[in-house]
Structures are given as C-alpha cells and as structure tokens.
Image (cartoon, coloured by chain):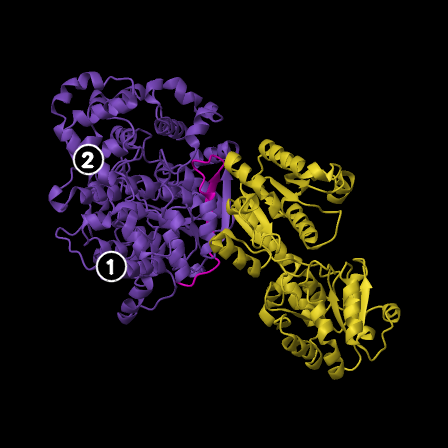
Amino acid sequence: MKTGKLQIWVPELVAREGGIQSYSNEMLEAVVEILGPERVTVLSKSDNQAALRIFCGEKVEAHSLGHVPSGVRTLAFSELLLRKGLTEKPDLILSTHAHFSPVGKMLGLRARIPVAISAHGVEVWNLPRGRTRNGLLATDTILPVSEYTRDRLMSELGLPAERFEIIHNTFDAKIFSPGPARMKLRETYGLRPEDKLLLCVSRMEASEQYKGYRQIIQVMPSLIQKIPGLKFMVVGRGTDRKNMEGLAGRLGVREHVIFTGYVSSEELPDHYRLADAFAMPSKREGFGIVYLEAMGCGRRCLGGNKDAARDALRNGELGVLVDPDDLQDLEQGVLRLFKEPPPEPEKLHHLANQYFGRDVFRTKVRALLESFGLR
Amino acid sequence: MCGIAGISGWQKKPEELRAALEGMQRALGHRGPDDRGILLDPKGKWGLIHTRLSILDLSPCGRQPMTSSDGKWHIVFNGEIYNYRDLRPGLEKAGHRFFSGSDTEVLLESLAREGMGVLPKLRGMFAFGLLRAEDGQVWLGRDLFGIKPLYTAVGPDGELIFASEVRAVLASGRVPREVSPAGLDGYLRTGSLPRPFSLVRGVFQQRSGTWSHYVPQAAKPGSLLDSHFFRKIGFEREPTTPDGKTMMARVRSALEESLEAHFVSDVPVGLFLSGGIDSTAIAALAASSGRKGMQSYSLGFRERRHDEAPLTRWVARRFGMDHHLMRLDAENGRDCFQGYLEAMDQPTLDGFNTYCVSTLASQNGAKVVLSGLGGDELFGGYRSFSRVPELKKWSERAGILRMLLPVIERFPGARVRRVGEILGESPSLEQEFLAFRGNFTRREAQSLRKEMSRELGEWEIRADLYDNLGRLDRDRFPTDADAVGYLELTRYMRHQLLKDSDVFSMSHGLELRVPFVDMGLFDAIRGLPAAIRYQTGKRLLTSAVPEIPDYIYQHPKRGFTLPVETWMKGPWKDMFADVHKRFPEALLQPWSRLWSLKTLMHWLEKHGFAAGD
C-alpha cells in the first residue's frame, strides 16, 4: 500500500556543482525511486525553472525561483515554501539545507508537518543564536552526513542522539571505478612513467584555509627526498592558486606541484585513476565526497583526523588519518601511502561501495521515509 | 498463536460433525494462516480443529491437534508457554521422548502426566482444549490474566462446543442466533462483553485462571460455568516495603525476566510503540539486553493533540530499532474502519488503534509483536486509581442530594446522568469503577435494550443484569487502591483491552504479546504496598527503567488515543448515519457511545441477529 506525499526543498539541483548539490541530487533520485514521481514535489531556490523541469522529468512537480532577483529571492522562496506547505500538506518535508529550517519550524508548528533537515558541515557548525538555530532545534529529525557533524550538533544544540539520523554522502560507483587512466592525460601533465602522483581535489579559496593542500606543499621538499619522482597535483580552481604557486616556488618544489585548475566532472574520474594516492588533510570537512570518489577509483586516501574524514575513511579502516596541524605526522602519513603495499583497487572500490554506495544511501532513505509513514 | 475449536458428545451423523468443524475452521482461518489441522473421532463422537500461526518449531512437528505419546490424549492449544524449555527436562527425566520443539508438546505431556496441577506452573498465555480419546471427556483451561480467549456452548444434543472466537462457535451451526440479554446489558454498560457472557445466548467465556471439565453424558448449559481456579489474582494482604535499592533491583530483574521470556520465538519479534512510558520501557529493556534492529510500529496523525509520531521515532532511534509509521487520517482511516468492523469478533468500543497498527505490522511481514499493555494496570497509570476511591467517598457523603435523583436521572446531559447513576447506587468501589469506566448508565442501557429487541422478555429488559455479577470481597484488599487495581486487571484490561488486542492482532495473523501481563512480574510487585506500586507518573516503573528518556515522562499522558471523535463529527458522519437515525441523539454523546452502538448494530446485522424490530 503506497501512502504519503513528500516535499523536497533544495538550494539548487542543476545550477552549480558541489557537495550539497550532489547530495540533493542523490536524495531526489532516491525519493523518486522509492515513492514514485507523482508523490514528490521539488521546491528549488536558485535553479532555472526550465532547466529544473528537464532535470526532474515531467512527472515530478517542480518549482524554482532562479528568475527572481537574488536580493529578494530568499523572501520569495520562503513564501513559496510556506504556501506550498500549507496547501499541499505533505507527510514529510525534506530540506537539504539548514537555511530553510525557520520555514520548516513554522510549518511544523502551524500545520503539524514533520520536517527533516540535512546538515552537511560548516553551514551548521557554531550556529549563532538566531532563526536557523531555532529552526534546527524545532526540527523533527536532523540528517547529518557524518557522525562528526552529528556529534558536533549534539553538543552545540544540546539535542539527544535520537533527534539525528545519519545519512552519509554517497557516490556513483559506476562512474568512479578502477581502471587505467587515459595516457593522453599523463602527457598533458608531463608525467613520466616513473613518476609517483599524489592527488588532491579541492576548491582553492584563499578565504578557506582548511583543505590542507598548503600543508602538503610545505612537506613536499622533504617528501621528494624520500619518494623520488613524487608529484603533487591539485585539481580545482580558486583565488588561492596564486599563493600556492608562490609557496611552491619559494620551497623549490614548483616543478613537483601541478595545478590543473577547473576539471569537468566528466574528466574527474580519470584524474583519480591517474594518481597513485589521494590526500586531503582537511580540518573542516563535513564529509568529503572526494574521498569516496578516490576510493571508488581504487585509490588509497589520506585525510585529517579532526573532521568528518574520519567517517569517510571509517576511522582509518579505509585510509590513512593524520593530524592536519602536525606536519611531521602528515609527512609520515604520505610516506605510508607510498611505502605500504597499495590496496587492490577492486577491493577498495568494493569496500567504498559497500559502506557508502547508492544502495546503502537508498536503504537509509527508505528507512527514514518509513519512519515518517511514507511507503 | 492460533485458532482452536472442538466439539464433543456429538449425537448426529459423523459427516455432519465434520461439516460443523470445517465451518468453525473456516471462521478461524485468519488466526492461523500457516497450517490447518483436523482430528475426528473414528466413531464420530468428537472432533478437534486447529488453525496454525507458526512461531515456535516452524516444522510440521508442531502441528495440531496433537496426540500424546501414549495415544490417550489430544490437545488443541492457542497461546505461548514461555517457560516450556524449563519444563521439558522434567518430562524427559520421566521418560518422555520429545518429537518436536514446540511448547504444545510440553503442555500436552505435562497435562497428560500431571493433570491440571501443572497449570499454575505455566508462564505465558494460553487457552486449550484437552480431550480424552476413549470417552471424549474434555478439559478446558485459560490463563490467569485472560490473555487468550476461549468460548464455550452446549448444543441442542448436549454436545460441548468450544472455540477461540464467538463467530467460530456460531459457525458450528449448533447455537441459535439469539442475543444474550445479560451480555447485551453488560456490553452497553461497559463497552465490552463482561464474563461470563458473550453477546450470544448460551455462549460463555471460559473464566480466566480456571479450568473446567466436561463429561459428554452429563452436559447442561449451566455446567460450563462450573470452573476450578488454578490461581487467583490478588495482592498481599500485609504488604512489606523493602528498601529502595532492593525493591528497584527486584522490579528490574522481574521486568527483564518477563521480557526475556516474551522473546522466546523462532520468528523475529517486533514492538508496538505508542510514545508512552510502557512501550518505551520495553524498547529500553530490549536494547539493554543487547537486541538491535527490532522492528517497531506506530500510528501517527495530523491532528496535533493525538500525534505522538515524533516521540515514537525518537525512541525507536534511541534504542536502535527499525521504525515503521502509519499516518492515519480521516481518508485512509475509513478503509481501516471497515476492516475493523469485519475483523470484530464481538462488538467493542475500543481496539481500532490495535487494528490499524496491526495492519502496518503485518504489511511489514511481522508475526509476533510486543505491546506495553498492562503497564498502566500494574503501575497505576490510570486516573481511576485516585478518582474511583474519591468518587466513593463523595458518594458516601452525598446524602441529601439523593433526593434529587429522579430529576437528575432524566437530565439531558450525559455527565449529569452519570452523576445520577452514582447517587442511585449504594456507594461501593465496583459501582464507582463502573461509573468511571462505564459506557451507558443502567437506566440508559435499559431503555436501549427495550428499544433494540422486542423478543426479550419483560424481566430481561428490566433487571439490572450486569450488576448482578460478583461483588468484591473487600477483605482481600488492604486498601481501596488495591481494589481498584484488581478491578482494572480483571475487568477493563481483561474484558476490553486483552480481548480487543487478541482479536484485532490475530485478524492479521499477528501474535501480540504482553510482557507486563506476566505472572512473574506480577508476583514480584504484588507484595508491595499500593502506595508504592501506584505512584504518580508510574514512578516505580520509571525508576526501575532509568533508560526511559525524560521527554517521555515529561510529556502529558495521552494513551494510544485517536482523533476519531473529530472524524466522526465530520468526514465519517455518513458511516454513522444509521445509528443517528435509530437512536435518540441524547444517548449518542460522548463519541464512545455512538461508536459502541455502531459496532453493535454492525455485528448483529452481519451475524444475522434480529437487531430489534
């Protein structure tokens, strides 16, 4: 017996790429598969309406406010959420961003509509007193993407564990799979057959000093001594690139550091395959989908032990965890990546899929929907 | 666990016996979807039938009717003997070689060897019919609390007919379709069928905690009511108060033991979560015994006053359960109400919630679920524990108000008429309990009976049939609260809650188990003074299970209530139009009265009883 309607609120699905957007996509796909398109309504804040329609397909009711000037979009979107909530009275509202939590709270209080809100990382940590925080406090169920975020929210908001349901990020195991990298790519980046490649995939924003590529560059001089032919590649764009080029130059390792700039999502899997190992000793990761993608391609990962990389690398079961503030520890970690016998790519892929694959994600979403009476 | 029925002392042709039994078996089909068994006397004097819901020993070895190793005894049994594994070694020592892993075989061999003396040793819920092959003599037994139902009747040729449900007795074709005036009175007064009656004249309930013996040649309808107690429910007359720690430890271990016993099963055991203290306590105890991934089931509503869905979700998560929720609204509730009416064995004003949540559980493949039923009765969760003694005191002092009785009894407001009822009787806890729990007042019930049936004789309409039932032996109870506790256990819980729970879960092929309604647990607390057992907020229970999260007991108590009242006034109005048309509006408030008359009319019509004119 199929019962219940669902509304899903997203910042955007089509317009930009990033962790929250990719999570929103996965969530939408999952709920449409579980409930069927007729029982799902999508409300998107910033997508282009026509693009969203194409993206969601004809059967899913989808509305967005991408055409509204950004200055008033938040207000207009709140009005849309309230209106749609009160008229449709869904059995569950699933918001993939915490910023919509104040509207969720209003609907919960007024119309008794249960709300579940995803919590990714920085956007919910250290929330000041205010509407978003109050909204989250009133939320039926918060959906952190990692134990790390859950634990932080538990202590910061003073909520018990049962108010949270962890739904880890997932990845597409068909796209991110082991295999040989295209030779052309090696040539493009001037890699010799004997070179060892360490990869990092990250935004490079000067304002966000937590991803950890800087620290890797800092230990490169020493690493090169121990791993001849080591190259470090950073995939991603941003304002910090200039600074990093300068840093690498000053340390005399400019030749050993490759900045690729923007790489499209189609080309990304081959970049993982090109690498021998992956490292992002970040300090403030809400989850770190890039670890999953790297492992999906069969590449061993290094992550920081102070954030949700612990979740993605399962406390060291799947990869190496280091103290991101301790350069020595970082260096030792990278050495381990190269000195220890590499894991079989297929096996690592299998494990990543077993813990974080789409099936796991869907099972979790299905159980969540069940607990709200949606079947 | 199953549906059982049997006939003994048959005087007609053997083929007709088979037909009668097969009819009964069909009527019990929903109780046991897994297997069906029939056993017929070669001489055609008796027969037993069984419909099976396999829970212990899923193999064909657990089939019923089962015959003892010496071939002299046959049994049909419904229920669970949770301590059957403890009883097995004794029987093995005595030389019995077990061929199955079922509790039925343990029960059968115990009864065959030790007779009815074994009954006080059984932990669990049961109703059975034991038949001696050589002469067709039958022994019937039912558990102490009345968890499992058993009905009996004597047919026109003096044959004994017994079954798990009234409709199965009717399906034998040997009982005339006549309304029992006393049963009807009891139903109208209380909202359920009080012992020993059913709604059918001549069909009786086996008394809980008793066994009875039937000899084919000597059967008269009245002889069925002669039963022998193997145990009675009672509290210690001189209770003692151990120190706090000892007491908590005792209650805790009794709770854990009971729960452990109720987990005995060869299929997964789920839980009905209501968002209250009792079911949360079960969830907490289950988790602390290391059980993870249990399935839990709840109802949710859009009506805020009734919705405890978030609480149940949080509790389920806290204790690592896999939670399922059914969001019930006026629309899907309609279908459920129709299903509920069809599933009913006897009319009732309750049980809709059990029906709905059982639907959800069975859709998810559950076969056994636990419920928090009984926690309120044992630990004083009802207002009746304080209100009923208060009412009695008030009634004792009412003196001069009694002169206004004739006016009050005819007052249009139902509440005032209820006051009239209290004043009209001599003050007693039984009367005040009835006033607190009851449905229609005596006078209202009389006028309804008059309205409903012209077949009933004058006496059967006028007499206070229900009130003639047993009075409390006050000497057995040290305090008023003890007496109320006894009434809650033996009247409301036994006749209303347990019966509804059995019927509406079994109608989905689902076994409902009640860990609070357990002999061991009861024995652990019956020696404590009422003031400790019945502390406000069920403190005895919450202190024994400190894992219960504070948001559960800080939450105002709502029980497992439903927003049906709102629906009955609005979107469901059409479904109750027939009742509105037939009975005066003054009698249809509050909603429980309307509900109880609806189920009554539906039942009478469905089973071909003349519902009046």
Q: Report crowding for label 1: few under 14, some 14 to 19, many 20 or more residues within 10 A (C-alpha).
A: few
Does the magenta run of residues contain B574? no
Does B78 sit left or right of A76 as displayed? left
CA distance for labels 1 and 2 = 38 Å
Give the residues in magenta.
B289-309
Q: Position of residue B322 (x, y in %)?
A: 50, 54
As rendered, which of B547 and B95 lies closer to the eye? Answer: B547
- Residue that protrudes farthest toward the front in the picture: A250
In the rendering, at what x and y percent does residue A263 appear? Answer: 81, 60
Q: Is residue A154 left or right of residue A336?
A: left
Q: Where is residue B468? Give x, y as percent.
A: 17, 32
Q: Are marks 1 and 2 in contact (CB under 8 Å)?
A: no
The residue carrying mark 1 is B121
Q: Which chain is purple?
A: B
Q: Is residue A64 visible?
A: no
Q: Is residue B176 above or below residue B284?
A: above
Q: Name which residue lies at 13% across and 46% down.
A: B476
Between discs 1 and 2, the one toward the N terminus: 1
Residue A212 figure quarter: bottom right
Question: Was residue B291 drawn as part of the magenta stretch in this picture?
Answer: yes
Instruction: Specify the chain shown as yellow.
Output: A
Which dot marks residue B390? Answer: 2
